[in-house]
Every structure is written in C-alpha cells, then in structure tokens.
Image: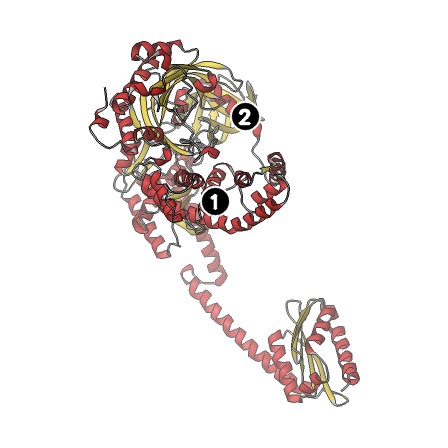
C-alpha cells in the first residue's frame, strides 16, 4: 500500500505538509490537536522544552487533568547536549520540531504500534522493506505485536538495552520502555548484520514510549496510575527521508537559511568545502533556535536559558566570520528565520521587532569584544603550550564574552586543548564572589516543597466561586521542616487539599485571610494567613497560628479576606481595561511586558518607545471610567487555546498555556487569557485613576494606577496636601497656584533688587577703598574684605578697582559668603604682572590656607575655601607676601 498523498504527486511532501499530515492523521483518530507550548517549560527539572511530551508531564503524573483522552501536537524543542555535532552529522539539531501522539490512559501499546505503522507506510508512503524497528530487550509483548500483527520480519525487529530503549524525560519523572522505527537507506544490504548505530545506513524517525512508570529521586520505579503513550517523530528527519536528502539541513525546513547565509558570504553551498558547509549548517540550525528562543521570551545573559541563547548566537557570529562575513548579519538571518517559520508559528511575526532588536543588540555587543578576544586568543595560541590554561579561558569568557565551548572550538582548530577543570575552578571562584553579594532562597525549603509535590496531589482551587470553604490540611511546614502539628505562635506554611485562597500568580497577589477551626468549633483555631504562593502545583498558605493547634488531616474553614480580595479584583479587571485603552488610544501593537495587581494599586508595564502625553493619559483615564460607568459584564469562559485565539483574546507574552484556557471577556471592550480573579461587572471597579507614567527600561513604559476603594485614601492624601498648602500660603485651594506664581515673581524681583543694591554698595565701598591704597615702591596694593558678596560680583569689583587705580596696582579682595564659604579674587595691573607676580598663584595660596583652592590667569584669578576662621589671617599673610614680592622681585 503506497500513500495517496505521496504517490499522487510528483514532488515530495514539504515540511509543512508532513506536519499537517501527522496532526490530521491523529485528529481524525480522536486526538485533540494542541498548539506547541513555549520553549520555556513550566518544569523546574529542565531549562528548555526538550521533548514533545514535556507540556504533558503533569498529566502523565496524574497531577493535572488531561484536556482529552488523547492528543497530538507539533512541539518546538531545543536540545543543546549534542551541539558540537550540529552541522557535522546528518541530523543533529539544537532547535527541532517533534510531532507526537499521546494517550492519557486511553489506548496503549498495540494501538500505538498499529497507527505508527499505518501513518509511516500509508500516509508517508514509506516502503515496509525500508523499515526496521527496535524494542526494549525485555518487551516480548512489543515483539509479538510487530511480528504477528504488523508482519515485520523478526530479523528486522532489534532488541536493545535500557540505554537505548527505555525512555525518561529526566532522572525523575514518568518513563517507560520504548520502540523505535528506523528508515533503512540500504535494504539491499540485507537483514543479517543490522547495526542501528550505523547512521550512514539507518535513521531513527519515530519513537513510541510506553509510559507506565514513575521514577523517583532514589531511582525507584513505581507504576503510574494509567498506562500512557508518548511518541515523538522528528519532523526534520521525516523531511530528510521523504525529500530524499542526505541530511536534515538540506530539507525545506532549514535550507532557505543556509542559502541566505551563503549569499551573505558571497559563496555557493554546493561548491564550498566541507568546513564551509559545516559553518553554513550551524548558521542555518542556530538561526532557527535563536529566533524561536527570543520569540518565547528568552533574552541573552550569562545564566541559564539566557546563556544558551547567548552561546548559540555567538556561534552564529563566529561561523559567519569563518565564512568571511565580517559585518553585522544576524538581523538578516532573523528576518529570514521569521519568514521561513512564521506560517507555522505566527508569534514570530508578532514578535518581529523584539527578535530583531535583541539580535542586533547582542551581535553588536559581541562584535565589540570579539576582535579583542580573537587577538588575545591568537597571541595565546602563538605560545608553545599545548593547553590553554583555565585562567586564560576564563578571562576570555569573563572579559571578552567567549563561551568556553567557543574557545575550545577555536583551540581545537589549532590542535590544542583547554584546561576545562581549571576553567571550572576559576568560574566557581567567581560565582562564590557573586554569591556573597546576594541573599539566596533557602534551599531546604525548595527541596521540602518539591519533596512534598512528589507525593501529594496538586491543590484544587475553589476561589473563583467561593471565598469560604471547609478544607483538609495535607502538609504543614514549620521552620522549613515537615511537621505533624503546629500550635499557637508558630509561623507555618500550610498546604490544603483544596483552597479558596488565590495563590500569587500572573501578577496578582496571593489572598490574605484566616484558617478557622471546623464548622462546630470555629473559634478553637485561628491561623492568620498573610500570603499564598504557588510552587509545583501546590498552594502554600504562609501565616501564623494565633490560637489553637493545627494537625495534618484536620478539617479547617479557609476564609479569604473578602474586602482585600475585592480590591485585588478591581485592580485586575482595571488592568485589562488599561491594556485595551492603551491599544485603542495609543497604539494597537502595544503588548504587556509585566504587571502587578496588588490590593492598593496596579502596575502595568508595556512596550512603547516614548512617554505618553498628559493629555493622552487623561483620555485613557476618561475612557476607562466610561467603561466603568457603562457597567459592562465580565464573562469568564474556558475554551481551547486555538478557539480563544480565533476569538481575538490577547495572550501574555512568555506565558505558558494548556490546551484549555480561561478567557476573561468584557464584550466589545477587552478579551484576555487570564487565570486571575475579576469583578463580575466593570461597575464594581467604581473609579480608576492614573498615578504616574514613567520609563523603566529602553522601550518599556510603566503606568501605575489605582482603582475602586483604593482611590479614596489617595484622594484624601492629595486633598490634605492641598489644604495644608492653602493654609500655608493663606489662600483657598483654588488660588494656591496663583499665589505660588505671585510669590515666585516677588522672589525674582527681590533678588534682582538685592543684586543691584549689593553692586551699588560695592561701588560705594570701592570709592572708600580707593583711598586705602598702600604704596609699595612704584606699586600700589589694595587688600580688603567684604561680607556676603558672591565671587562674580567680587571679581567685577576687583577688576574695576584695578582699572581705576592703574597698571601698577595689585587688588586682592576676600568675601565671607552666607553658606559658610570664603571667596578670594585678585586683579593685577599690567606692570604688576610684568614684575613677575601671578594672580592665580596668589589666590590659590590664600585659598589653601582656608582649606580650598582655585586659580586663573596671571592678571585675574579667583579661589574659594571653607575655613572661615583663617579668613582674616590668610588675607594678612597674602598682603605681606604681596608687599615682599613687589619689593624683592627683580625688574
Ligand atoms: N518522549 C520521547 C522522545 O523524546 C518520545 O516522544 O523521544
């Protein structure tokens, strides 16, 4: 049987057609089609989404309800463990797409195998003679199904050990034996010596995992509640097979990027040597990865995911340089990646600016240091040493931004190695230094919560419907230790089987309230709950026992502080209105960059290049208050993600959504995906007031606002302030402004008058001073002091006096200023300067005596000091110095 989709057409299927054919095949067999989750997983055990099953892990573990009994997806994945092989082998990638069909306790081994075979042979048209399967060595059931039900030649059913055919998503978590389907490029070589590791002959394209166990942190396997199916088909691999290419890179999923890079380098892929081909393949592969990573909210840094992005991005730049591209080219690669993938992943187009911006910035940052680093490295490589020391590698990393692996790659090209252990030591020392500077989260608590999460079910949340409910205590933590009971005075963390308390998330604060004794003895126990957070699906109620004893298994009444909850709700719905108003009145492309929904305020960060004018802010405020007064219904519905998107719901950047999403809809006003709590109609918000609009980072603005009952205390504060100002300025509030302006004008006039009075005073004093001039041989000197005359005025006076008195005169004036400072000015006539005296030196010397300094030209200089006590004596010293200089200086 050969597939219609392949045999009817002369051309091979494109990547997009393969993806669609897979999803369609399983959708027609009752599977729910799921959108790809983000590359940032909601799973603390891995940094990135590494397999199609990852978003379903909580379902396999029984911690979350499945959206349907079976599902199918094309999941964006990134693996970096084989990064060195990218471009060198036919099929290693960082970014790839994994097609999968999943059963959550629905069908199992037999059905999974039947469908996998049908899909491979009938939809993708693979000749059964080209197929080989592997099974876990102990899995006789799988062997029988392949052999008897499917009819595979037993010689083409290969038994493999746990290393190859027992699949787990990590050291802890769901796992099970698996069976893989391989494509054989050379069936003519027969089936006697099948070695599946020979990748020139075989390529594994489909992995069927029979997920039936959970592996705990000790490595013990326990059966899962359900027998599940998790499969993964590498989209790029199937494209390689069907498009008859010798490697994945030459398929239509990546090759356009290789062509783009080749054209930027002015070379031809088919003609370039092997090394050049590798560089082109690395650029093609990594360009997809970096665009997708940035799209999903990763930004380059030296930690975690940010470091992975930085490393990939820098490898692209470096391979570009190996090909002779010395200019900036990442934006061009980013644009080509968006064009190539945005049909399947429209978010790439939506985030175009963010992606290209990050690429441009990070490339510029790297290029700045790359040349200096390359020079340093080439100097190091000139030495005789076979090994680059750990410190040298660390310096390259720390100062020049060279990822270790890049240094290794370059040194390898020169036949040298890097002292990796030495690098680690240097790195550790630096981390230690950094650590000393920050407060870390208590690791014991993390492990306690994670430990509990392995053994208890996630907390059920009832707080959308009720704010008061009877719940059972399932775990208690006091001082980071699990305890059986806690009593009066203890600071506790309480986990209940279910709760009406909202746990902090999506920017909304956790609820506050109380836990009380059971229905009959409510007052026997009072626990004040100050905050509720979430971790691993558990809601952690943090508080203090005011009265009574709390034990595991106790039934308690969980009572949310309704007043505070209402305030948080008003702020949350107001945040949605604010986002809509910004889109409507400022720019439709504005998107959320962060938010805080608190009891007494809201903060909304959004992408926008410049400040929003006061006039616009007023319009926004008015529109929101109109929506409040119009009393719009707030409808909350659960629907499939795809449906929500079709309906136009706004999704938050970087957020992970399940198959079913909660849509908060205010018809004709706003529609957002949101897990938070909201008012039931906009009228409940009461009033909305913007408090401030500021910039928080480049291209990110922040609006702080208040809503509902939180507006009253704010207005009261303002009112009090205005009243106080009125009392102070002796004017009714409405006239305060007029009064302040009048006072400012009055002050200006007074200052002017003061200045005139002072300069008149100086002129008058100057006349008197002129008569105090002392003769020193053929010269005259005048030394005098003032009070409260600023340096500028003093300088004018000194100059005027000197000019009046003639070229043979040295004038030195000092002034004690109101601020406790002193000021000196010296103005020397031409003859005095010719005599060899320097005004700059003289004032500097006196100012030094008063704890200051200064200087200027030989004929005019000024200086200042702070030591008032030395003022008089300094002037005296200066005078006698002037006298002796004028007498002694040779003509
Ligand atoms: N989880 C398995 C894998 O990644 C099958 O999808 O290979």
What x and y, as percent, mark residue 821?
66, 68
Query: Residue visible at 28% across and 41% down?
Result: 631
Res 513 seen here? yes
Q: Is residue 524 above or below residue 416?
A: above
What x and y, as percent, mark residue 861?
65, 76
Tell me the residue that label 2 is attached to: 447
What x and y, as percent, mark residue 185?
35, 24
Q: Is residue 646 above or below residue 851?
A: above
What x and y, as percent, mark residue 57?
41, 24
CB at disc 2 and ligand 1 closer than 8 Å: no
Query: Residue visible at 71% across and 75% down?
Result: 841
Quarter of the picture holding the C terminus:
bottom right
Q: Is residue 181 above or below residue 843?
A: above
Front residue of 7 and 888: 7
Tell me the residue that label 1 is attached to: 318
Q: Quadrant of residue 642?
A: top left
Q: In which quarter of the image is residue 149?
A: top left
Q: In which quarter of the image is residue 386?
A: top right
Would residue 713 appear left or right of 780 to someone viewing this image? left
Would residue 844 appear left or right of 688 to someone viewing this image? right
Q: In which quarter of the image is ligand 1?
A: top left
Would residue 873 appear left or right of 344 to someone viewing this image? right
Quarter of the picture holding the N terminus:
top left
Q: What element carries label 1?
A: helix
Res 576 seen here? no
Front residue of 717 and 575: 575
Cα separation, mark 1 vs mark 2, equals 40 Å
Query: Residue visible at 54% across and 38% down?
Result: 412
């Amino acid at each position: 049987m050969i597939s219609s989709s392949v045999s009817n057409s002369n051309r091979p299927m494109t990547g997009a057609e393969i993806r669609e054919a897979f999803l369609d095949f399983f959708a027609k067999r009752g599977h729910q089609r799921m959108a790809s989750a983000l590359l940032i997983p909601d799973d603390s055990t891995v940094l990135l989404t590494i397999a199609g099953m990852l978003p379903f892990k909580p379902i396999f573990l029984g911690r979350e309800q499945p959206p349907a009994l079976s599902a199918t997806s094309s999941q964006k994945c990134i693996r970096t463990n084989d990064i060195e092989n990218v471009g060198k082998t036919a099929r290693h990638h960082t970014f790839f797409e994994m097609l999968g069909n999943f059963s959550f306790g629905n069908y199992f081994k037999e059905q999974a195998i039947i469908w996998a075979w049908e899909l491979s042979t009938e939809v993708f048209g693979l000749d059964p003679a080209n197929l080989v399967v592997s099974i876990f060595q102990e899995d006789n059931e799988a062997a029988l199904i392949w052999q008897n039900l499917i009819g595979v030649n037993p010689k083409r059913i290969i038994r493999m050990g746990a290393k190859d055919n027992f699949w787990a998503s990590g050291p802890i978590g769901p796992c099970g034996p698996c069976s893989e389907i391989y494509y054989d490029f050379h069936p003519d070589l027969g089936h006697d010596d099948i070695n599946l590791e020979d990748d020139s002959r075989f390529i594994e394209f489909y992995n069927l995992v029979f997920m039936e166990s959970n592996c705990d942190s000790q490595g013990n396997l326990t059966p899962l509640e359900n027998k599940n199916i998790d499969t993964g088909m590498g989209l790029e691999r199937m494209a390689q097979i069907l498009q008859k290419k010798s490697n994945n890179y030459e398929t239509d999923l990546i090759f356009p990027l290789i062509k783009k890079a080749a054209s930027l380098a002015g070379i031809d892929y088919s003609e370039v040597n092997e090394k050049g081909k590798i560089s082109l393949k690395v650029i093609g592969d990594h360009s997809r990865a970096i665009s997708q990573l940035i799209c999903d909210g990763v930004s380059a840094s030296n930690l975690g995911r940010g470091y992975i992005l930085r490393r990939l991005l820098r490898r692209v730049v470096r391979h570009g340089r190996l090909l002779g591209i010395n200019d900036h080219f990442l934006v061009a690669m980013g644009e080509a990646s968006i064009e190539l993938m945005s049909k399947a992943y429209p978010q790439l187009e939506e985030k175009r600016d963010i992606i290209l911006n990050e690429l441009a910035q990070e490339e510029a940052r790297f290029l700045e240091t790359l040349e200096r680093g390359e020079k340093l490295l080439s100097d190091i490589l000139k030495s005789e040493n076979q090994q680059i020391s750990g410190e040298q590698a660390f310096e390259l990393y720390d100062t020049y931004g060279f990822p270790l692996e890049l240094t290794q790659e370059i040194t390898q090209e020169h036949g040298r190695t890097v002292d990796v252990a030495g690098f680690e030591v240097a790195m550790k020392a630096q981390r230690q230094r950094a650590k000393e500077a920050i407060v870390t989260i208590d690791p014991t608590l993390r492990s306690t919560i994670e430990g509990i999460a392995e053994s208890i079910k996630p907390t059920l949340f009832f707080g959308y419907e009720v704010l008061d409910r009877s719940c059972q205590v399932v775990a208690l933590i006091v001082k980071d230790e699990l305890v059986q009971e806690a009593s009066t005075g203890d600071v506790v963390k309480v986990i209940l089987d279910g709760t009406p308390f909202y746990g902090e998330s999506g920017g909304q604060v956790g609820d506050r309230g109380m836990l009380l004794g059971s229905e009959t003895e409510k007052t026997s126990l009072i626990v004040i709950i100050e905050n509720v957070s979430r971790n691993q699906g558990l809601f952690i109620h943090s508080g203090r026992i005011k009265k009574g004893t709390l034990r595991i298994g106790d039934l308690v009444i969980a009572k949310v502080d309704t007043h505070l909850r209402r305030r948080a709700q008003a702020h949350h719905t107001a945040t949605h209105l604010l986002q809509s108003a910004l889109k409507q009145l400022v720019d439709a492309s504005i998107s959320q960059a962060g938010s805080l929904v608190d009891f007494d305020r809201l903060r909304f960060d959004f992408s926008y290049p410049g400040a929003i004018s006061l006039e616009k802010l007023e319009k926004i405020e008015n529109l929101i208050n109109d929506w409040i007064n119009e009393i719009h219904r707030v409808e909350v519905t659960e629907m499939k993600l795809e449906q929500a998107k079709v309906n136009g719901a706004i999704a938050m950047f970087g957020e992970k959504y399940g198959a079913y999403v909660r849509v908060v809809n205010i018809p004709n006003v706003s529609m957002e995906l949101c897990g938070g709590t909201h008012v039931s109609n906009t009228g409940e918000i009461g009033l909305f007031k913007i408090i401030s609009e500021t910039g928080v980072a480049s291209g990110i603005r922040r609006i702080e606002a208040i809503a509902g009952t939180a507006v009253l205390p704010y207005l009261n504060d303002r009112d009090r302030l205005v009243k106080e100002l009125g009392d102070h300025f002796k004017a009714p509030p409405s006239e305060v402004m007029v009064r302040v302006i009048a006072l400012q004008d009055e002050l200006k006039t007074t200052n002017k008058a003061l200045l005139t009075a002072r300069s008149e005073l100086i002129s008058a004093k100057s006349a008197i001073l002129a008569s105090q001039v002392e003769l020193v041989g053929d010269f005259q000197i005048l030394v005098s002091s003032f009070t409260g005359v600023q340096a500028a005025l003093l300088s004018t006076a000194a100059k005027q006096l000197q000019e009046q008195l003639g070229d043979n005169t040295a004038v030195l004036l000092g002034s004690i200023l109101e601020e406790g400072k002193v000021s000196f000015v010296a103005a020397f006539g031409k003859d005095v300067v010719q005599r060899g005296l320097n005004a700059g030196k003289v004032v500097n010397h006196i100012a030094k005596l008063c704890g200051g300094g200064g200087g200027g030209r030989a004929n005019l200089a000024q200086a200042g000091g702070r030591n008032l006590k030395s003022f008089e004596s300094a002037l005296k010293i200066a005078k006698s110095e002037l006298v002796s200089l004028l007498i002694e200086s040779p003509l």
